[in-house]
Image: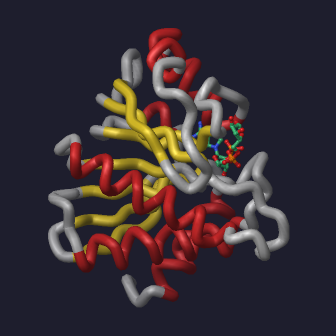
């Protein structure tokens, strides 16, 4: 369900409450771990929906550093591709968590641009099992995407912040307001 939209140049930013595996976009972002070999939460949902070929491809990637991301095909998902981002575990805010989380959002935009993918959907990375405070994470997510696209549009036409609860959507809406997007 669409909650809010805002435009940055030619890119439309949208907040939805939905299961990210159902979205018909070029690429969905996974909240993965450094092994890239699956897990619970959205990682588990994406692997279940994509089918076993996704894990087979992930096995060839050699893992991924926290704060970065790697791309695979989407297989049985509607999305053509999956960008596996590894968010930081929240340890109270003194371990560079905010910079690492911003790196996930930025790297995903770069990978989408490299692969000419023009629509991308993000879950609220790190705000589940990794316990990142949802309000701070939403500000980092929206702030990073908005400032990156304002300086380098990367040919991206649509960015969806795919929230899994109304509370998460509210945090992203507050971030839109805080950034002066609405
Ligand atoms: N669609 C969209 N969002 C979802 C879905 C879904 N199907 N399932 C869960 N979420 C939301 C959660 O509600 C949370 O807001 O994704 C956000 C991220 O939560 P997690 O999936 O727990 O991811 P994260 O906190 O980044 O922890 C990553 O969890 O699953 C493992 O392998 C993963 O070790 C890694 C860790």
Q: How many marks?
A: 0
Quadrant hosting ligand 1: top right
Quarter of the image that includes the C terminus: bottom left
Q: Residue at x 41, y 62 (%)?
A: 106
Instruction: Tell me: 23 left or right of 135.
Output: left
Instruction: Tell me: 162 left or right of 87.
Output: left
Instruction: Look at the picture and state if 172 lies above or below 64.
Output: below
Q: Give the x, y percent position of residue 148.
A: 33, 72
Depth check, front residue: 6 or 154: 154
Q: Residue at x 84, y 71 (%)?
A: 92
Q: Give the x, y percent position of residue 113.
A: 23, 51
Visual colour scheme: secondary structure
Instruction: Tell me: 61 left or right of 14.
Output: right
Q: Residue at x 44, y 39 (%)?
A: 70
Q: Give the x, y percent position of residue 86.
A: 59, 47
Q: Residue at x 35, y 25 (%)?
A: 73
Depth check, front residue: 140 or 161: 140
Instruction: Tell me: 156 left or right of 22.
Output: left
Instruction: Look at the picture and state if 2 lies above or below 129.
Output: below
Q: Give the x, y percent position of residue 58.
A: 50, 23
Instruction: Look at the picture and state if 83 lies above or below 142.
Output: above
The residue furthest right is 92
Among the 4 quarters of the image, the one containing residue 159: bottom left
């Amino acid at each position: 369900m669409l909650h809010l939209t805002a435009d940055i140049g030619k890119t439309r930013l949208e907040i939805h409450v939905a299961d990210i595996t159902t979205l018909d976009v070029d690429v969905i972002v996974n909240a993965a771990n450094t092994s890239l070999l699956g897990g619970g939460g959205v990682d588990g949902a994406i692997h279940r929906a994509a089918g076993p070929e996704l894990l087979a491809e992930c096995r060839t990637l050699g893992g991924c550093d926290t704060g970065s991301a790697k791309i695979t095909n989407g297989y049985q998902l509607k999305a053509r591709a999956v960008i596996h981002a590894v968010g930081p575990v929240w340890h109270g805010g003194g371990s560079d968590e905010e910079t690492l989380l911003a790196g996930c959002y930025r790297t995903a935009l770069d990978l989408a641009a490299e692969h000419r993918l023009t629509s991308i959907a993000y879950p609220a990375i790190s705000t589940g099992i990794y316990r990142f405070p949802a309000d701070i994470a939403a500000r980092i997510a929206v702030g990073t995407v908005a400032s990156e696209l304002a300086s380098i549009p990367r040919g991206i036409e649509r960015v969806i912040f795919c929230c899994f609860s109304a509370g998460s959507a509210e945090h992203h809406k507050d971030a839109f307001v805080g950034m002066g997007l609405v």
